[in-house]
Image: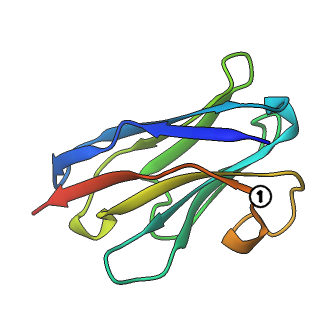
Amino acid sequence: QVQLVESGGGLVQAGGSLRLSCAASGRAFSSLFMGWFRQPPGKEREFVSAINYSGSSTYYADSVKGRFTISRDNAKNTVDLQMNSLKPEDTAVYYCAAKIGGNYYNNHAKYNYWGQGTQVTVSS
């Protein structure tokens, strides 16, 4: 089993920044492919970003490319999402997720483990 705990959400004005962090436990962190997803109010869960086992490859949704940066620290068992230039449409519950394989990184159904989510609200 893998436990994931997110932190860092909150309320921010448009144009501001937030940094989300996800702490993992229960399995060798370097064996996990990590992702961030979000679920806006009344909408389905959507892919935000993902990072491979070593951190050498990163992936982003078009809507966040150039504004968000994903990173991981395998020594600390954490994965972070730095969010800059936030927009009201970024408002959502953000989830950290982990999977064993690296394929289909943008498909939430392929992830094995999920955190409880953290709310991000961007005011206009």
Q: Is residue 107 visible?
A: no
Looking at numbered disc 1 in the image, what kind of residue is underneath it?
A: Asn
Q: Residue at x 52, y 44 (%)?
A: 69
State the image coordinates of residue 56 (x, y, percent, origin top left). Answer: 78, 38
Q: Residue at x 48, y 40 (%)?
A: 6
Residue 120 located left or right of residue 6:
left
State the image coordinates of residue 113 (x, y, percent, origin top left). Answer: 71, 53
Residue 68 located left or right of residue 87:
right
State the image coordinates of residue 75 (x, y, percent, origin top left). Answer: 73, 16
Relative to 77, residue 15 above or below? below
In depth, the one of 84 and 79 nearer the eye is 79
**In the figure, residue 124 lies in which quadrant?**
bottom left
Residue furthest left as drawn: 124
Q: Residue at x 50, y 59 (%)?
A: 65
In what quadrant of the picture does the N terminus appear?
top right
Q: Residue at x 87, y 64 (%)?
A: 103
Residue 50 located left or right of residue 18:
right
Q: Is residue 105 visible?
A: yes
Secondary structure found at label 1: loop
Residue bearing the label numbered 1: 112
Colour mapping used in the image: rainbow
In depth, the one of 51 and 36 nearer the eye is 36
